[in-house]
Amino acid sequence: MPPRLPHFVGRSDLLDDMARRLAASGRAAVCGVQGLGGVGKTALAVEYAHQHAAEFDAVWWIPAEDPDLIPGYISALGVALGLPDGAAWPSVAGALRQEQRRWLLVLDNVEDLDVVGPFQPTDAFGHLLVTSRRSGLTSFGQVVEVAELSRDEAVLMLSERVVGMDRSVADEIARLLGDLPLAVEQAIGFLTQTGTPPKEYAGLLTERLADMLSRGWVANRPQVTVANLWELSLTRLQAQRPAAVRLLELCAFCAPEPIPLDLFSLFTSDVDDLPAGPLRDAAGLGGDGRRPGRVRVGPP
């Protein structure tokens, strides 16, 4: 397992929810931890694994973002169990079952949901925990949705770890960062490493938010920032659905306020008003290649 985070704050309700869902799953003990990038899914899984480690004979952590690397981690688990190097999951699972070992496997940051299926437990000894930004984990078992920190939790993180942090300034920083755990950790790292006064840092966030989201070192997550997490996601989406990226950019102009659903009817009723590009192409052509008529978006 990764080391336990020394400054884990709050989330007791989510940890309890994960424990209940895994316990209630019976022979198919699978729990998905789902949420946006930077919202704290990995930290939550690390804390859960450490809190419940004594309940298992084997706990194994697999960074699952790249499916090609998963067999190597499974092979390493096999070696730890006394199997020859290169053992695949069926052999490893068989060894665990034969020795009646209670096990917890964590698949962290799954991008391709197809990798999850083979690791679903087939007996009461196995438990599977999956973290992912992708939706669809309900196909495998129970799901815990992870949202941002509460404002009180974000303020507590800042005020306890940054010397001289005034609570009102901590509240302002947390608000500007949307109470996103990774962003708050970056802020703490930046403030402690540079000695920047918290009030001045709040001003930098107001004036240069995008730039500041790329700064700040986070323990146990080198080179990981909110900025590069979102850049990676957008790069992948750009390759797969370029119109979706353009739609996100347009929606960002309305953030953080709710967007009236009727606004989106303009994308099909007044396609010619959209600038040339993938979004205009997607909105202007139906499945048969013809322009659709006016589409009403919203409740009936």
Image: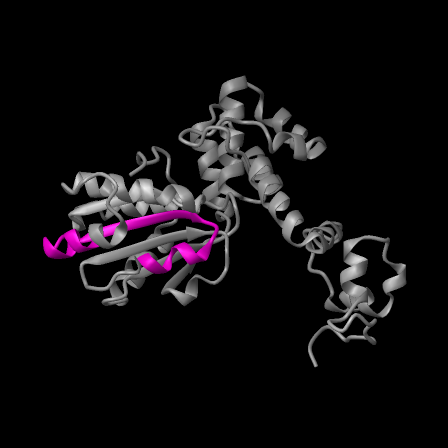
Where is residue 287 shown, x and y percent of the image? 73, 71
Give the left or right position of residue 116, taking residue 281 as reference. Answer: left
Where is residue 61 shown, x and y percent of the image? 31, 43
Looking at the image, which residue sits at the far right?
A: 272
Q: Residue at x 65, y 32 (%)?
A: 205
Q: Quadrant of the N terminus?
A: top left
Dividing the picture into quadrants, the one containing residue 175 is top right
How many numbered marks, from 0 up? 0
Asked whether the viewer can see residue 173, the reply is no
Q: Quadrant of the C terminus?
A: bottom right
Residue 86's place in the image compared with 274, above or below, is above
Residue 260's place in the image compared with 87, above or below, is below
Residue 96 forms part of the magenta stretch: yes
Where is residue 254 shown, x and y percent of the image? 74, 53
Give the left or right position of residue 71, taking residue 158 as reference. Answer: left
Residue 16's place in the image compared with 2, above or below, is below
Dividing the picture into quadrants, the one containing residue 145 is bottom left
Give the left or right position of residue 175, taking residue 271 as reference. Answer: left
Please give the range of residues in magenta: 93-118
Q: Residue at x 28, y 46 (%)?
A: 49
Residue 37 forms part of the magenta stretch: no
Where is residue 271 shown, x and y percent of the image? 85, 64
132 or 81: nearer the viewer:
81
